[in-house]
Amino acid sequence: MNPGGPEILVVTYHFLSGEAWPGKGVHPFGTDRFREQVELLSRTSRFLSLEELEAPGLPGLGGFARYALLAFDDGLAEQFEVAWPILEGMGIPGAFFPCTSPLQTGKLLHVHRLHALRGAMDDGKLLALFKSLARSLGFDESARVIEAGNLPEAPYPYDGPEARALKSLFNYTLPQAEREALSASAFSQVCGEEAPWAERLYMVPAMIRELARNGCLGTHTHSHRPLSRMDREGIRQEIRESLDILEKTSGVRPRSVSYPYGNSLAVSPEVFEVAADCGLRCGFTTERRANFPRTDRLQLARFDAEDLPPGKRPIASL
C-alpha cells in the first residue's frame, strides 16, 4: 500500500573521513562508500534540496521512483571538505545542520568530548573516571547514579552494556550542567586543551556562508541537547539562538532543524510545536523509516547511512 504518494528517503551522515579526529572514538563512513551510496541513490532517486522540501508542494519526480535528501549533522568541517565537492560535482543538493555553540565558544560540543574520551580509554575506565570526578566536584547524586547504572531504555542497539551506560548517562540522565562539567573536566585531564580539537573539527564561517548561498543550510540547535528534556522556554532558546547565530554568520535564516539525538528520548509533541513557533518548516528525527508527501514535515524520519547499502547494517534496499 502506498500511503499518499512516492517515498521521501532521508539519509544522515556524521563523520566521513575521520582524518581530523584521532583515536577509535568515531566510525567514519568513508569517502569511497559515501560516493558509492550517492551513486546508488542517483539511479532511482530524485534528489531534493532543503528549499524544495520546505515548499508547500514537491517538484515532479521526473521519472524517478522516489525522492531523496542527504543530511549532514553537527557541522563537521570534513563534511564540507569531503561531501560538498562530491555533491557539487554531481549536481546534487544536500542539507547541512551545524550546531552553533562551537562558533561562539571555540570549544567542543559535549557529544564530541565523549567521542574523544571513548577513543582514549575503554568505557569501563571512563565510567570509573566520571564517578571519581563527580565525587570530587561534589556531584554526589550523579556519582551514585553512575555507580548504580539505572538507565532509561537507551536507544543504542549496537553498543555493549558499558557503552550504553555511558551514552545514556551523559546524553540523557545526568543534570545538564553536571554532565557538561564532568565531560569538560575529564577531557582536560585525558586529552588536554579542547580549542585545537574544535578548530580542526568544525566548519568555519566561510563554509557555512557557502552552504547558505546554495540553499543547503539548516540548524542542529545551539548546543546539541536533547530538547524534550528541557522546558518550553529552554527549547525555544536552543533553537532561536542557533537561528540568530546562523543568520548573523551567513545572512540566511534557516527554516529546517535536525533534532539532536532525534529519538523518543529527545523529541516530543512540545518540541515540534516550539519548532513551528520558531518559524521552522521541516524537522528531522532519527526514526528509521521512509517518509511520504503527507508526512508532517516537522516530524520527518531518517535512515543512518549505515542502514542502506553499502552500509554495515542495511535494513532497507536501494
Image (cartoon, rainbow, N blue to C red):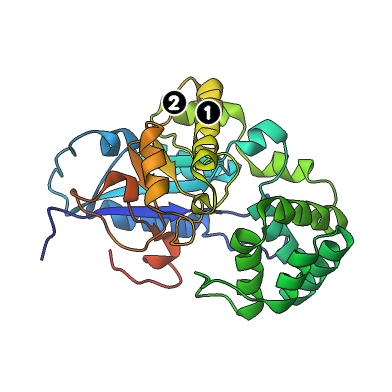
Place of residue 6 in the rendered image (x, y in percent of width and height, measured from the top left): 16, 53
Q: Which residue is painted at 34% across and 41% down in the image?
A: 282
Q: Secondary structure at mark 1?
A: helix
Q: Dot 2 corresponds to which residue?
A: 253
Quarter of the figure with residue 191: bottom right
Q: Earlier in the sequence, mark 2 or mark 1?
A: 1
Q: Nearer the viewer, residue 160 or 41?
A: 160
Q: Alpha-carbon neighbours of circle 1 within 10 Å: few (<14), some, or many (≥20)? A: many
The correct choice, above or below, for 92 with respect to 151 in the image is above
Q: Which residue is painted at 71% across and 56% down in the image?
A: 179
Q: Label 1 amino acid?
A: Leu
State how many labels appear.
2
Q: Alpha-carbon neighbours of circle 2 within 10 Å: few (<14), some, or many (≥20)? A: many
> The C terminus is located in which quarter?
bottom left
Q: Is residue 226 visible?
A: yes
Q: Nearer the viewer, residue 300 or 240?
A: 240
Place of residue 248 in the rendered image (x, y in percent of width and height, measured from the top left): 55, 21
| Mark 2 → mark 1, Cα distance in angstroms | 6 Å
Q: Nearer the viewer, residue 309 or 193?
A: 193
Q: Which residue is painted at 44% across and 46% down in the image?
A: 258
Check if mark 2's residue and mark 1's residue have beta carbons within 8 Å: yes
The disc at residue 246 is 1
Q: Label 2 amino acid?
A: Arg
Q: Is residue 41 left or right of residue 124?
A: left
> The N terminus is located in which quarter?
bottom left
The correct choice, above or below, for 133 with respect to 95 in the image is below
The disc at residue 93 is none
Q: Secondary structure at mark 2?
A: loop
Quarter of the figure with residue 100: top right
Quarter of the figure with residue 313: bottom left
Q: Which residue is painted at 52% across and 46% down in the image?
A: 231
Place of residue 200 in the rendered image (x, y in percent of width and height, measured from the top left): 70, 42
